[in-house]
Image (tube, rainbow, N blue to C red):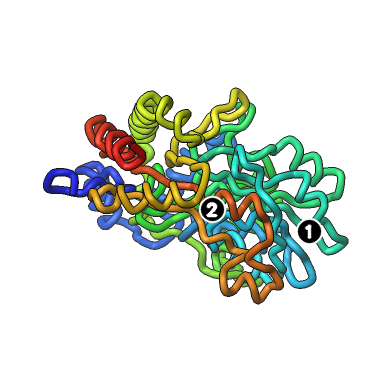
Amino acid sequence: MVGDRTIQLTEPWFDDSETGRIAQALAGRVAGNGPFGQRVETRLESMLGSPRVLLTTSCTHALELALLALGVGPGHEVICPSFTFVSTANAVLRVGARPVFAEIDSDSLGLDPTDVANRLTPRTAALLPVHYAGIAPDMDSLLALATDRGLRVIEDAAQGLAATYRGRALGTLGDAGCFSFHETKNITCGEGGALALRDPELARRAEIIREKGTNRSAFLRGEVDKYTWLLEGSSYVLSDILAAVLDAQLDKLNEIQARRARLAHRYRAGLGDWAERNGVRLPLESPDRSTNHHLFHLLFADGTSRDLCLSGLRQRGIGAAFHYVPLHSSPFGRTLGYQPSDFPVTNRVAETLLRLPLHPTLSDGDVDLVIAALQEIMR
């Protein structure tokens, strides 16, 4: 233990702001697409520079909604990384398409465009890059590849809110961008998501699918005198109670980002020499990419050193974790025809990556304790 407490890996910052907004929501409409939901969508549109943002119940559902709206389905393939959370591939499977895994590059930890190009087939309908840790892969090359082949691009920006690539917000580079407001994310309502769309017709289609296949949203705006069933759809609308929490969280976003940036800088300053001595790589810094400091990770020279530090930190009451069990090597991934030895870069990253605590309620002293613990463990 660190003194008489533990240092959490992630922790949301809630206070009276959230409880006050919840009380306001409870006094009005609590179903989806209410006043708070509409307000948050407008705020996100302005922040992202996106013509349309739709709140959803999760990033998983945002991914599903994007694929459905784009017409991706049976007979199609979608290329995505194996180094990602299961939702990325599950969304593809849920619409009846097949996820095709591709290698990541060892710098951004995102899709490697060269490997993606080698996995294209006549059935490829879309690319699904993931912005790991709020750091974009080589989106110029991926977007060029998509344009050349007539492919759609859906960005898994679950970790990407408030990060940019060449000055543009992550989640607005392709046809659709999907965000998460899970409790581990920079801003949160516990469970929630959003879908950013740039094409008005695609946004109209997604809005209908989100509302059980009806034009209820148009009815609530007074555009039609009654609503009816137009398309196959589902229920992806976020409750206004959770939207109220997001509204309060958006008020804090600048402060949350400032705190995360300060803590990440403290990690870099305190671990720079130690990392160089031990062959450990710190997160990518690039003039083309502005990160949101969603997480701070280390890449060790080998799995033995990573596991030593992971267990040592946990024994000291310091939250630490790895990312991910690669999807291609998982039990279900193997049913798709993949072998555990596939994708050597992905496997190496998964075996050597360690996440350190990073969240807005973490103190400078907590970071110093984590740094000191790592130095002691590797001494």
For the residue pair 39 and 64, the one nearer the viewer reads as 64
Residue under the image location 65 percent in, 76 percent down: 335
Residue lying at the far front of the rendered structure: 379
In the figure, residue 338 lies in which quadrant? bottom right
Residue under the image location 60 percent in, 55 percent down: 347
Q: Is residue 243 visible?
A: no
User: Can you say whether 23 is above or below 42 in the image?
Assistant: below
Q: Nearer the viewer, mark 2 or mark 1?
A: 2
Could you tell me if the residues under marks 2 and 1 are in contact, i.e. CB atoms within 8 Å? Answer: no
Q: Badge 1, how many Cα within 10 Å: few under 14, some, many 20+? A: many
Q: Amino acid at mark 2?
A: Ala
Query: Circle 1 sits in a helix, a strand or a loop, which is it?
Result: strand
User: Can you say whether 258 is above or below 12 in the image?
Assistant: above
Pointer 1 residue: 125
Numbered circle sitting on residue 205: none
Residue 296 point in image, percent of width and height: 43, 39
Residue lying at the far bottom of the rendered structure: 335
Residue 166 point in image, percent of width and height: 64, 27
Between disc 2 and disc 1, whose residue precedes?
A: 1
For the residue pair 72 and 135, the one nearer the viewer reads as 135
- Pick the quarter of the image with the C terminus: top left
Q: Is residue 264 visible?
A: yes
User: Can you say whether 166 is above or below 192 in the image?
Assistant: above
Q: How many numbered marks are there?
A: 2
Pointer 2 residue: 350
Residue under the image location 48 percent in, 36 percent down: 280
**As drawn, is 296 to the left or to the right of 17?**
right
Residue 167 point in image, percent of width and height: 61, 27
Residue under the image location 49 percent in, 42 percent down: 300
Q: Amino acid at mark 1?
A: Ala
**As drawn, is 78 to the left or to the right of 172?**
right
